[in-house]
Image (spheres, rainbow, N blue to C red):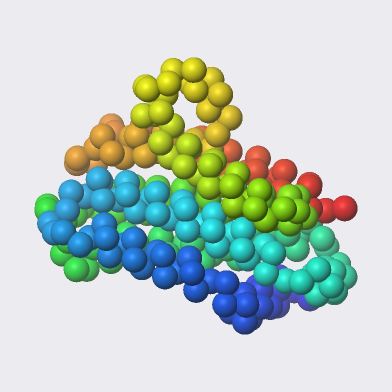
Amino acid sequence: MSIKSLMIYFFKDYKRSNKYIPPLLAYMILMGVVYAVKPCYVMTSYTATCIIIYIIAAWISVTFVDSEDIVQQQLTILHFKKENLYYLGKIAFVYFLILILSVITVFYPILLGCFIRKIYTLDIVIAFMSHAVIGLLGTALGGLFNSRIIKDKKIVVLFLSAILLVSIIRNPLVQVLPVFKWITVILPPVYLTIDKLSSIDYVNLQNSVGVMYTLAAAVIYSIILIFVFIKRCVK
């Protein structure tokens, strides 16, 4: 089985499972809420939709990784012959879906004229990169909470929801409870990008460099999570 065949199989299997419906419905509702009142500030809106992509990516990832029953999964791995690439393929498939959502998320408000000012190329570049990288972080985090690593689904929902929430509101939380500053340092660094984007009105080369640093941290963290995910899944 080739990588292409594996991706096609993943698509058919996930489509058949109908597990994609709740996160996509949530995505559409949340996007509608963000752009319900127009005109909107550019980077403030993109900060909000980055958070949406982060949550939806984790949601899709955690449901997709477990979409196959255990017997079918073992048969697919035997047919594909490379277990580590099989699990990497699962992450890649989810991330491909998230990239599509990221493109839609960035261009949807532009096409509908939702913003208060003119949009420039650098706005689009930074917005897309932010959504794509934060989406990767959510994908990697969600993949880590699968049944081969954590058996109890209630614990999965509880811990994943808690990590998503605290990693998003980390900075306000630390201001209220400074003791969390060192505890939350191990959390996904999504708050770094959120903090930078929300402080920007017009994107320029100077402030875009700051955003790029936060995205680099998110990419490194994502790679570590994916590595741990594969190591824990491969027996």
Q: Residue at x 48, y 37 (%)?
A: 167
Q: Can residue 11 be seen here?
A: no
Residue lying at 37% horizontally and 22% vertically, measured from the top left: 176
Residue 15 or 217: which is nearer the viewer? 15
Q: Residue at x 59, y 47 (%)?
A: 158
Q: Nearer the viewer, residue 67 or 105?
A: 67
Residue at point 16% right, 59% down? 37
Q: Is residue 84 left or right of residue 137?
A: right
Please tell me in which quadrant of the rendered image residue 175 appears: top left
Return the x and y of residue 100 as percentages of the image width and height: 45, 66
The N terminus, quarter of image: bottom right
Q: Position of residue 72 (x, y in %)?
A: 80, 75
The answer to whether residue 98 is above or below residue 184 is below
Camera-side residue of 83 and 51: 51
Residue 156 appears left or right of 208: right
Q: Is residue 185 left or right of residue 124?
A: right
Q: Is residue 175 visible?
A: yes
